[in-house]
Image (cartoon, grey):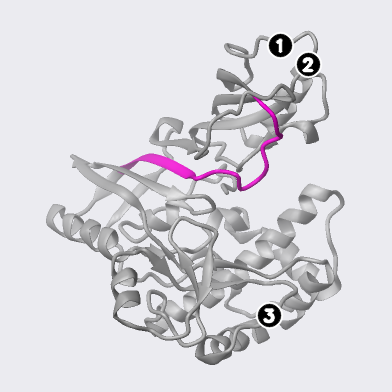
Amino acid sequence: MSLPPDSWLFALNPPRAHGEPLGAGAIKFAAEDFVVEERLGFSADGGDAHVLLKVQKRGLDTLALTRQLARIAGVSSRDVGFAGLKDRHAITTQWLTVPASRPPIEWQGVAGDGFLVTQALPHSRKLKRGALKGNLFSIVLRDVTVDAEALSHRIEVLKTHGVPNYFGAQRFGRDGGNLDLVDRFASNNELPYGREPRAFVYSAARSLIFNALLARRVLQGTWNRLLPGELVNLDGRNSWFVLEEFDEVLAQRLDRLDIHPTGPMAGKGAALSGEVGALEASVLAEFASLVERLSEAGLEADRRPLRLAPTDLVAQLEGTQLHVQFGLPAGAYATVVVREILSTELPAQDAAND
């Protein structure tokens, strides 16, 4: 095996930042218990090349949805654009684009196996992955055992300090099964056939390395601090700057969750310097063969915030049910917020969510 022996821990149960979970609960007991609404952050521009569709789906993953929409539109599924993958075992609302047709299709009200188009707007461009502002989550946890006062305190801690921005366990498949694919990629450059399956292996590999680095910094207590040489993220934006000198202004911005330290999404690119560069180099060295494979595959190095700041976080305990609502930026996982409150298990049928 080419992966470090604790890789499964980094993927499935990395260290928590705010202490042990306060209790346990069942997550995604029913589709209605996990409701997600995608926020694009922009409006349809009125162009005539594509149609921007708002779709509600249930019991259906995003790729299966694109195939159904493609059949209706008479195009390839590759021509259907979407901003992010959404859970199958949930009720989700997301935006997709299909090429405009002649004569035009009356998309609003179109329904299929597990979906309904609720809005259709003219738009000039195909929607690309990652082109969204974030997601709103409304989650119900059942059979909860938790002290109300401790719960209230923990919620305030999360609102004040944020949570580690791990990739969720579902990124790595059921029981971490996709890590076997990552290990074969690292060991023998073995990849599945097809563009989408290969991309998923690359994504899982980079996510594993990121989680390992973040786990190290959580254990060190530096996941929410800025180290010398840090590449700093502006909250909610794909924007960064190099830390040259830590002053009172940056300290205040860090405390109010306006800026965050970052970690590597492995690939080709220059390493950081200073204390943070040395720390990252030591973690990347543990995954040397995997980093080399990713670089050879042409993936460019990128950055991801180490800290996640949920917005409008609200929790309400009703008997043995806990209702939690919050917003997250694109690419963040709701389950990493929940795990800082309660211990949960994802259902076996759960799918990846970007």
Residue shown at the point (17%, 60%) measured from the top left:
153
Residue shown at the point (57%, 49%) measured from the top left:
354
Please tell me whether residue 126 belongs to the stretch shown in magenta: yes
Q: Nearer the viewer, residue 89 or 212?
A: 212
- Tell me where residue 290 appears, x and y as whole percent: 74, 75
Check contact, mark 1 vs mark 2: CB within 8 A: yes
The residue that mark 3 highlights is: 287
Q: Nearer the viewer, residue 143 or 267?
A: 267
Type of the residue with mark 3: Phe
User: Taking 222 as reference, is 113 above or below it?
Assistant: above
The residue that mark 1 highlights is: 105
Does any portion of residue 22 appear in the rendered image? no
Type of the residue with mark 1: Ile
Does any portion of residue 82 appear in the rendered image? yes
- Label located before the other in sequence (1 or 3): 1
- Tell me where residue 268 appears, x and y as whole percent: 75, 74
Residue shown at the point (74%, 28%) measured from the top left:
67
Label 1 packing within 10 angstroms: few (<14), some (14-19), many (20+) = few
Label 2 packing within 10 angstroms: few (<14), some (14-19), many (20+) = some
For the view shown, which residue lies furthest in the left direction? Answer: 149
The residue that mark 2 highlights is: 101
Residue 204 occupies which quadrant of the picture? bottom right
Type of the residue with mark 2: Ser
